Image: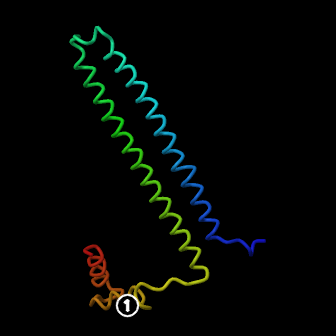
Amino acid sequence: MFLDHDSFKAEYDQFQWDVHMLIEGTLDASTRFLDTETKTELAKIEQWLKTPESIYNEYRDHWVDEHTDLLATNDGQELFLRSLAFVALASRLTHSLNKMARYAERFSERKSRYGGKERMDELEDFGLSTTSDSKSTLTIIGHVLLC
């Protein structure tokens, strides 16, 4: 029934699914693709380097540089993919926690940041008048902009 529905458990399950399927799955697939592409290119370069003609060939240094550049590029791209996954994970976690906090407000009201005072009372504590004349309104706006 609807009364048996646990919003927190549902959000937790959705978070787990998103992490495993969307974030980890995407990271795994893209890393495997990157490794496959790199291994294919490395095999071509190593095959060229192993041919007897290439031992004294003037292009040997070029292929050694290509080999080094390919490995460095692969490392950089893998680091980028892992960074993307980390940002996606942090974003999804923040979203889930915010959603759970909204669920919690249904049964436990959020406490005021101002100790039970209204925002305008808080401004008066700073010596700012909250009357409706234009000078005090400009003072409040100026104070808010400077903070």
For residue 6, which quarter of the picture?
A: bottom right
Picture residue at 51% right of the left edge, 50% below the top: 23
Relative depth, front residue between 121 and 104 = 104
In the figure, 115 relative to 144: above or below?
below
- Mark 1 highlights which residue? 121
The picture quadrant where one finds residue 112 is bottom left
Which residue occupies 55% across, 84% down?
109
Residue 120 x %, y %: 38, 87
Q: Position of residue 37 (x, y in %)?
A: 44, 29
Residue in view at x 28 percent, y 29 percent = 68
Q: Front-most of 79 and 5? A: 79
- Snapshot colouring: rainbow
Residue 69 lies left or right of residue 115; in this view the side is: left
Locate the C terminus and report the quarter of the image it occupies: bottom left
For residue 68, above or below residue 115: above
The picture places residue 88, in percent across and down from the top left corner, at: 46, 54
**In the picture shown, does residue 28 fall above or below 145?**
above
- Under mark 1, the amino acid is Asp
Mark 1 closeness class: few <14, some 14–19, many ≥20 residues within 10 Å? some
Residue at the spot 39% in from the left edge and 50% down from the top edge:
83
